Image (cartoon, rainbow, N blue to C red):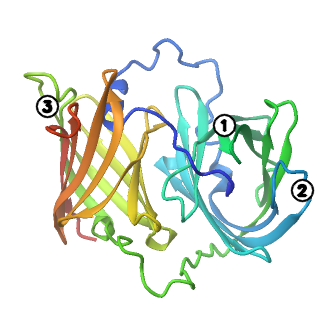
Amino acid sequence: MLLRKFILCTIVSALVWLPVWAQENAPANSPGAKHDLRDGTHDFDFDFGTWKTHSSRLLHPLTGSTTWAEMDGITVVKKVWDGRANLAEFKADGPAGPIELLSLRYYNPTARQWSLAFATPNAGKLSVPCIGEFRNGRGDFYDQEEFNGKQILVRFSIWKITEDTAQSEQAFSADGGRTWEVNWVNKYTRKNDQTEIDWTDQNTSQPSPGAHDFDFNLGTWHTHIRRNPDPFANNTTSIELNGTVTVRKVWGGRAQLEEIEADGPKRHWEALTLFLYNPSSHQWSQTFINSRLGVITSAMTGALKDGNVELLQQDTFNDRSILVRATWSDIAPNSHSYTESFSDDGGKSWKTSFIAHLTRLKE
């Protein structure tokens, strides 16, 4: 139920999701662990369900404008990872026109903070996440972003929380946090009928090219995973895991949320992948979150190519700049393979770092 529209143009810079595997082997009591902070794992439990939402939006923030737009809509918030993450979908309309948003929220158990990342249907990527926590019944989350060519601070707050009502607001600061201008206020009232949002796009009679590239991915799958912790090293022993992958539609199919759960020789592992479609570029982005670390990776982007889906990104591994390629291949109704590879020579050669074979489970 956390809603933003104005700034969705940059992506957090972080490690690619496979190097995150190496970090997750670090001991929980490593330096910097915040054991003295309260456990906020279930701070968003109040939010699960369906909410009638009234929003007031300042149309031209940081310009001196006092013109506000009112709109009414529905917010649906669904639990992920037993409450350690959740996904909020919002749709509303008013005199200024319709708005659709989603917010992926996930908990960092080491920092004991929540990250709130947002997306609009036309962006095709998640925004820079606001990061913060709840204190005394109020949640405040902050980030720095570019707005109208300038770097500003963004604050997203949630308070006035009861069993059936809540309120949130977004505010901008152009002076380093000395003053804040509120530009979006959301008031929520719980709906007991658990209404689902109708995501039908009334303005589009034909699907955009590439919009269904990942339809094969929907459903529940058994996965066998083999990963190489360092594909550039010689004689590295691979690690094997077995588990389940569950993929469901978001935004009526214009996005997908993938939940991964697997067991290996060392520990149980969980992760999320959010797939978002960009109707302008006709490409998909893949953003990964590791449950133990609660951190988000930079997004891979790409599309269907020669019967396979291929996504690429530039990232770092062992402090070296590399290319990362993700490929879905051997796509059939009840099976497919996922391979992730690294290149340190500009794509001339590739080293396999991760491969998963997936078989559909019967409903």
Q: CA distance from mark 1 to mark 3?
A: 38 Å
The residue depicted at 80 percent of the width and 37 percent of the height is 174
Residue 132: image location, x then y, percent: 67, 35
| 206 is higher (above) or lower (below) than 339 | below
- Expressed as whole percent of the image width and height from the top left, the position of residue 263 reads 26, 39
Image vertical order of residue 16 relative to residue 164, above or below: above
* Mark earlier in primary sequence (2, 3): 2
> Can residue 140 be seen in this snapshot?
no
Q: Which mark is residue 238?
A: 3
Q: Where residue 235 appears, x then y in whole percent? A: 7, 22
Element class at badge 3? loop
Name the quadrant containing residue 39: top right
Q: Point out which mark residue 143 bears.
A: 1
In the rendering, at what x and y percent does residue 324 appear? 28, 40
Label 2 or label 3, whichever lies nearer to me, is: 2
**243 left or right of 52?**
left
SS at mark 2? loop
Inspect the image, locate mark 2, and give the three-letter code of the amino acid beneath it: Ser
* Earlier sequence position, callout 1 versus callout 3: 1
